[in-house]
Amino acid sequence: FGFLFPANYLLAVPYFRFYILSFLIGALGAGLVLRSTGKTRYSLRAFLYSTPFYLLFAFFSIKWYGTWGAIITAMLGIILPKCFQFYFEIRLLKVSFKKFMPWANMGKIFMLSLVLILPVFVINAIKPVGFWLAIVLSAIYLTVVYWLEIKKNLFIVSKDSIHNAVCKMNTAFRKSILLLK
């Protein structure tokens, strides 16, 4: 990592950590419904409606807050058009905001992920983890999160689909073993 991100980039780390939060909004898939229904002109409108707010905000936030203002402006440039796109999609689908996405399940996934990452923070606070331990902790974390999501039927694939796939693989494995004998 030192090769890719030399020490002189360390001052920028807090800004990028904050900026990464804007990816959460992008991950919600705003604009997908508009593209799939051929209503891409609404995406253009979302960006056009965002521009005056963005430019005004950019001028004052960068002037008054410098780099932090620039990072927040960059986040606004990502988030604001997405909010307009969500608005257009909700209108197009004729659903309420509450029914637009599975907010309750998303909240459960968020809380589950947050609670399970806390031990990693505690371990890192006690003794900073190295590269290999970070990989091991990441693998354990992902395994536990996925297992609990599957168990609570919050995973992207249903528990029944996973069970059927595992049964099919098990049957295929047993047949291949029998053929080898």
Image: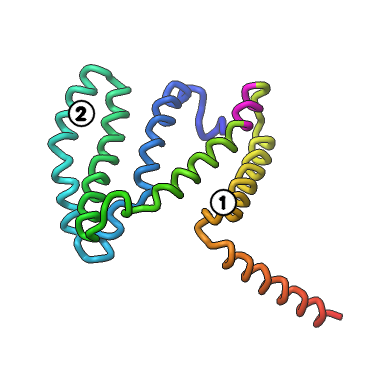
Q: Nearer the viewer, residue 72 or 166?
A: 166
Asked if residue 120 lies in the magenta stretch, the reply is: yes
Q: Where 14 falls versus 21 (above or below)?
A: above
Give the residue type at disc 2.
Ala
Residue occupying the point 16% across, 34% down = 53
Q: Which label lies toward us, 1 or 2?
A: 1
Residue occupying the point 54% across, 56% down = 153
> At which x and y percent is residue 156?
50, 58
On residue 58, the disc is: 2
Q: Where 150 falls versus 11 (above or below)?
A: below
Q: Where 123 falls versus 27 (above or below)?
A: above
Residue occupying the point 39% across, 27% down = 15
The C terminus appears in which quarter of the rendering?
A: bottom right
The N terminus appears in which quarter of the rendering?
A: top right
Q: How is the image coloured?
A: rainbow
Dot 1 or dot 2, earlier in sequence: 2
Q: Magenta span covers which residues?
A: 119-125
Q: Where 36 falls versus 4 (above or below)?
A: below
Q: Which residue is mark 1?
A: 149
Task: Kindly state the secondary structure of the residue where label 2 is placed.
Answer: helix
